[in-house]
Amino acid sequence: MSKLVETFKNIWKIEELKQRLLFTLFAIIVARIGAHITLPGVDFEVLTAFNKGAAQDLFGLFDFFVGGAFSNAAIFALGVMPYITASIIMQLAGIVIPEIQKMQKEGEEGRRKINQYTRLLTVPICMFQSWGMTIRLVNMEANGMPVVPNSGFFFVLSTIILLTAGTMFLMWLGEKITERGVGNGISLLIFIGIVARFPTALYQEFSQVFTLGERPWPVEVIILTFWVAIVASIIFISQGARRIPVQYAKRQVGRKIYGGTTQYIPLRVITAGVMPIIFAQSIIFIPQTIFNFFPTSQWLHNIVVAFSERSFIYAILYAGLVILFTYFYTAVIFNPRDIADNMKKQGGFIPGIRPGQQTSEYIDSVLTKITLPGSIFLAIIAVIPTFAINVLGVTSSFASFFGGTSILIVVGVILDTLQQIESFLLMRHYDGFMKSGRIRGRTAGVGGI
């Protein structure tokens, strides 16, 4: 404990690190303030009454990532999700569009161009989603009162402008956090939106024990111990990797000799990160979202019941979709052929494997083998909230932190941020957070996003 306290003291001794932390804290406060500023023309009291009876659907999933800003109809209601959507589109476009694929191979210059195109693509996505949100707000009502009393062209136009500007501001703020703060800015903004709900979820959970008396406190201790074990397992698995040795042949350039060293290709167990769970959730919530537009349909109601969180069909289908999307997204973001070609150009080879096609097949084989346990682990993490609700009797708000996207994003962002802080400490000859070993953070933001 004293070691940890001493580490935190050393953090504030480094002037640059202290300024970065303060800037990050200021940016987070600004983002949270914007999540509570309601759009002009929206009756907040009627909106609050409507949200009390709202069902869990795609809108609820979206609201979870933006820290409640969507349900508040705030100026930051869209969060950075349009930017994430644009990034995913650009990644997928690299498979079918040769020009984008070429830019992906151009190094830093290519990444700069792709980032610029991603920003430009974010604008029309924001405008389209903002327009959809105006339609939803206009059609919402509670106790016979509309959420938007005076809907019209001016409300639609002002809402589209404000929501688009809010997302672009958050995108700029995230880039500034990455540049002048600590951690990945976009990831931190999603992280703080998720964590903002944790105190409320914890209060609702403990109120069952100390206020309502519905559950004895020893059972609650067991549940919290189970939750800690889940977090520890996620940390352990998320940092797990298979290292493939790569030997570089010696070559002489002038009077100097280069190469002759051994490096490693780290293939992570969870290469796809949280994206498989996000894709699976988006599909699994489609019936509930459609039912919201046709609430009188009986057969849609039966489908929604079958796909509810308490359904066995829901858990099986959800787990299967997670495994399927894990393989799909891993194939999208990791190309063994490109790795093999780059190794061959640089004079590298895997001992015992011929360069070129055989190297590509070997890497693909290893990646497929380690992806299987990783996909099964993600599927288990995805359905744990259902298990926590049905078997342990945990509240739905606290169960969302037992597994799924929330806990994976939180763990990934914390590891990445701590890794950056530890790098500053080690550069100034201070001890890091651990006496032995190093914290290995994620290099691709939130689980590969």
Image (cartoon, helix red, strand yellow):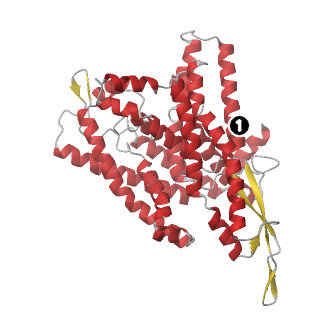
The residue at the point 36 percent across, 35 percent down is 72
Left or right: residue 406 versus residue 70 is right
Residue 253: x, y in percent?
Answer: 77, 87
Label 1: which residue?
233
Q: Quadrant of the N terminus?
A: top right
Residue 49: x, y in percent?
Answer: 32, 24
Residue 66: x, y in percent?
Answer: 44, 41
Secondary element under disc 1, as helix, strand or loop, is helix
The residue at the point 24 percent across, 33 percent down is 139
Q: Amino acid at mark 1?
A: Ser
Residue 443 found in image quarter: bottom right
Residue 230: x, y in percent?
Answer: 67, 32
391 lies above or below 421: above
376 lies above or below 346: above
* Res. 107 visible in picture: yes
401 lies above or below 217: below
The residue at the point 65 percent across, 39 percent down is 376
The 10 Å Cα crowd at callout 1, few under 14, some 14 to 19, many 20 or more, is few
Foreground residue, 395 or 353? 353
Judged from this view, the residue extending furthest toward the bottom is: 254
